[in-house]
Every structure is written in C-alpha cells, then in structure tokens.
Amino acid sequence: MKTRSAIPLVATLTWCLSVATAEADSSNKLRGVAPSDLQRYIPNEKGHWTCLDSSKTISFSAVNDDYCDCLDGSDEPGTSACGNGLFYCANEGHIPTRIKTSRVNDGVCDPDCCDGSDEYSGLVECPNVCEEVGAVAKQERARLQLIQQEGSKLRKDYIDFGKAAKAKMVLDLAQFHAQTEDLERAVEEAKKILDAATLAQEKYHEGSKGDREASRREQLAPLIQEQASRLARAKNVRNKLRATLQNLKENYNKNYHDTAVKNTITGFDDYITGLGEDHESEASTDEEQVDPTEYSITPDERINNLMDQTYVIQREIGTLYDLLDNMSREYNTENNDEAVQVSVKVVEEFSTTWVTDRQEFGDEAALEVPAELTDESPEAEKLKDDADVAQSAFDEASDRRTQVQDGIRDIENKMKADLGKDEAFAKLFDECFDFKDIEYTYSVCLFGDANQRSHSTTFLGKFSHWEGANYDVQVYSGGTKCWNGPDRSVKLVMTCGTQNEIISVAEPAKCEYVFRFQTPAVCPVLPEHENEASTPVDTEEEAPPKHTRHDEL
C-alpha cells in the first residue's frame, strides 16, 4: 500500500515544483518590463521573439540573459548588458518610472527606483522607501496644486487687466488725437497774441530810448567827470613814482653797495619788463582829455571803462610804492646818497594819501553809480503786463500740447510691446524687481533694463525679445561688454508662482546670466476659472506688490 501510494505523491510534488520554477523563470525573464508592455514580450509558437526595433529575431530564452542581442537593447530590459534600454521600476506607493538600463545593478541605489528593484544582484541592499517618498511627493503635489489654483485665478485677473488696459489705451489715444488739432490752433493763436504784445512793448521802448539815454547822460555826467579826474590823478602819481625809481636807477651811488637799494632797482626792472609794449604806448595816451559827453559809447560803458582803467593804474601805484617804501625802511642811512634821499622824500610825501592794504587813495570815497533808468510810466507798465499775460497763456498752451504729444508717444510705445497672446504681461510692463545675493543686487524692469549693483551699477542688457512661442523666457541683450568676453546678457526664465519675484540668479557662462522669475503671468488658467466673472480692474491705481513701480500702464 505505501509503495503504490508513494508514486502518485512524488509525481504531484515534482509537477508543483516545475510550475513554480517556470513562474519564477518567467518573472525573472520579464524583469524591468512595464505591465503595459508585457504583451510585446510573448514568444511565437516556435519559442522565438523579435526585437522591438525589428532588427533581429532571437530565441525567447535569450531575453534578459545578460547578453545584448538587439540594437535597441529591448532584449535586456532587466539587465545592464545593453545599457541603452529602459528598466521599469514599479515603485508601489509612489509613481512608477523608467531608468536607463545602464544604471541597473551598478551598486548605487537609484532615487528614481525608490523600491530598490534596480539593484537585485545583491551587490548593494536598497530598501523600499516608496511609501515615504510617495508621502513627500503627495505633499508637494498638493502644494503645487494650490499654487496652480491661486496662480490660475491671478493669471485670469492679469488677462482681464491687460484687456482693460489695452481698451483704455485705445480710448485715450483716440481722445488725445482728437485734441491735437485744437491744441495746435490754440498754440498758434497764443503765439500771435504774444508776438503782438512783445512787438508793441519793443516799439514803445524804442520810441522812448532816446529820452532815457539823454537823461542817463545827464545823470552820469558829473560822475564821469569825477572818475576822469581820479584817473588823471592816478596816472600822474604812477608816472611820478616811475620817474622817481628811474632817477634812482640812473643816479644812485653804486660804490655804497646798498642791498636795499639794489633790490628796489631789480624790482623796478622786473616791473618795466612786465609792462612790455604797453609802457611805450602809455606816453601818448596819458595826456588825453576825457570828454563826458562822448556819444560813441553809452554813459554806463564810459564810466565803467574809466573805473577799470583807474583800478589797473592803482595796482601799478601799489607795486611802485611798495618798492620805494621797503627801500626807505631798510636802506643804509649812513650813506649820503642824494638819489636815495630824493626817493625817500617822495615816499614820505605820498604815504599820507595812500592806503596800502586797499591800494587806493584815502581821500577818495567810492563812487556810487545809480541803477540804469527804466521807463515806469503807466503805459509801459500796461504793455509789460499785457506781454506777461500773453507769455503765460502761450506757455500754458504749449505745455498742454507737449503733454498730449508725450501721452500719444507713450501709449503708442506700450501698444507696440508684445505683452503675450492674451495681454497677461500688461500688469508687469516696466515693473522692477530685485534679487540680492551675498555680493550683488540684481534687478530687472520687465520690458526695460537689467542691471547688477554693488559699489557701482553694471548694465546687463535691455529687453530684446521673447524666446520661443510660450511667452515664458525673455532675453535682455546689449549689456556692458565683459573684459575679454561677450556683451553681458540676461535670460529671464519664468515659472508659475503666486507672487512676482526673482528667486535665483546664475551665471552658467561668462557674463551670460539666468534670472529665474516666479509670476502668475505664466500660470495656466484652469477650466474652472476660464468663464468666471472678473472683478472690475482699475488700470490707473492697481499695481503688483513687492517691487518698484516705474510707470502706470
């Protein structure tokens, strides 16, 4: 009984073991294949299988045999034999993914395969951390979803703002153009009135000019006469001092070797040398009489000329007097030098009338020249008031015309700007943002300039164009040239965010900067927000927060 019953039992156990082995072989053979691709790994009735790129047909037993047969590596999805295939990580509890087969069994726990299935050889033990990673990823997805939700609403507001701003600009531009013709006409009329008022004033003053000049000549005649007398006195004194020094130079006793006398004569020679040709021509002009009724120049020019001449000659007197005065204090009194004694006597006589520190005669008070005569008649005052009123009206009309012209130019420049296919960037036009790192502060004014600041400011570029068709990368070019390098430039790379801010600055190549910028302007508008009623937008007052605002759109 036992012998007979043992045969079926052994057969049953053998069959079960064969089935289990076959299932294990099948599982190992299709390691690294995604469930969606399993139907592509079925052998034909002859046990053959064709590479996924159709490059070769091999025995199905050669799949995952750690030898590369197919050019596309599809026969080795679970080994690193080919290296160019893809290994499927199930990552249960997280997100399935594929990695390069070159990273299978490389002794490194690949973070993309959080279940550790890429390291099944035993070379390294990789724990299954998919649940932990999945939980973190879930939190991140929730965070991003909130950003997408809020960013979507803000983007919708930006679009509405842009459309409203554009409509307002079209309206403002039409109103400005409508005012242009009237303003030009107003300026022309104001200019005619101003020209007439100015001409009337000029004619009146020209007519009364002769009377004013005659009155002025009469008013200044005694002052001119007095100043001419002062000039003549100054010339006489200067000439006497010159003659005294000339006599000293020619007649002093050289045998005494008086140092003070010699220094005085040397100073006099330097003075004469400094005069140059002027010294020769003065003799013919010193005796010229000044006519106070001279009409070749105005009375004011006449008296100013006389005062200037007097001033120059008094400076000369001061120089000559100082030479003689210093000698008289320091010469050797034991020497009986007649020429020196004559010079000392002249100094003593002259010192009573001369003020050395002011270099002028002490008995001559300064002449007070009255202000020029003006026409203060009622008629002149009225003409002046009329001209002032006309000038004010012309200035006001011109200013208004300039404001309208500037407004037209400003609106036309803004309307030329590419603010995105839905005008979402209208709210950011010329808005400025800063980013400070350890050494520098970087700034960009959208559609304007980018700069780098430290102790000084370096120009990084001006807005040039959008890169690509997605309206998420701006290029700023033409910055200050780098030493031994290119012109500086900036790429402003935008990502979805609930606030407008630069989040990082990098310089991947010499003087080529990448600013990463978060903004609602690039967030996708979710379907649930597309048809939402918009809050009315005040394009004059509302502005994005947390930056420097340069201009109102």
Image (spheres, rainbow, N blue to C red):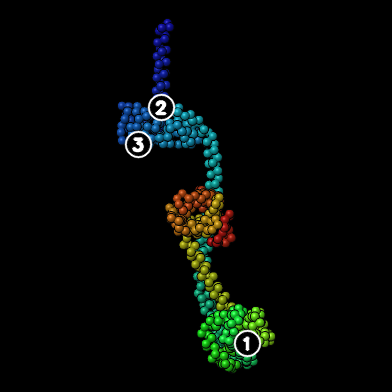
Contact between marks 1 and 3 (CB within 8 A): the answer is: no
From where the camera sits, is residue 358 visible? no
Left or right: 71 as drawn, with respect to 88: left
Question: Reading the chain from its start, which is encountered first: label 1 or label 2?
Answer: 2
From where the camera sits, is residue 232 visible? yes
Cα–Cα gap, marks 1 and 2: 139 Å
Contact between marks 2 and 3 (CB within 8 A): the answer is: no
Q: Mark 1 = which residue?
A: 338
Q: Which residue is rendered at x = 49% and y = 34% of the image? A: 114
Tag 2's secondary structure?
Answer: helix
Mark 3 surroundings: few (<14), some (14-19) or many (≥20) residues within 10 A: some
Residue 103 vertical placement versus 194 (above, below):
above
Q: Which residue is rendered at x = 53% and y = 72% of the image? A: 402
Front-most of residues 439 and 545: 439
Residue 66 pos. (x, y %): 37, 29
Q: Residue furthest front?
A: 255
Tag 1's secondary structure?
Answer: helix
Give the quadrant of the N terminus: top left
Cα–Cα gap, marks 2 and 3: 20 Å
Contact between marks 1 and 2 (CB within 8 A): the answer is: no
The amino acid on which the numbered mark 3 sits, given as a three-letter code, is: Asp
Question: Reading the chain from its start, which is encountered first: label 2 or label 3?
Answer: 2
Give the number of the mark in front: 1 or 3.
1
Question: Reading the chain from its start, which is encountered first: label 1 or label 3?
Answer: 3
Q: Mark 3 = which residue?
A: 72
The amino acid on which the numbered mark 2 sits, given as a three-letter code, is: Asn
Front-most of residues 508 and 525: 508
Give the number of the mark in front: 1 or 2.
1
Q: Mark 2 = which residue?
A: 28
Residue 32 vertical placement versus 343 (above, below):
above
Residue 504 vertical placement versus 223 (above, below):
above
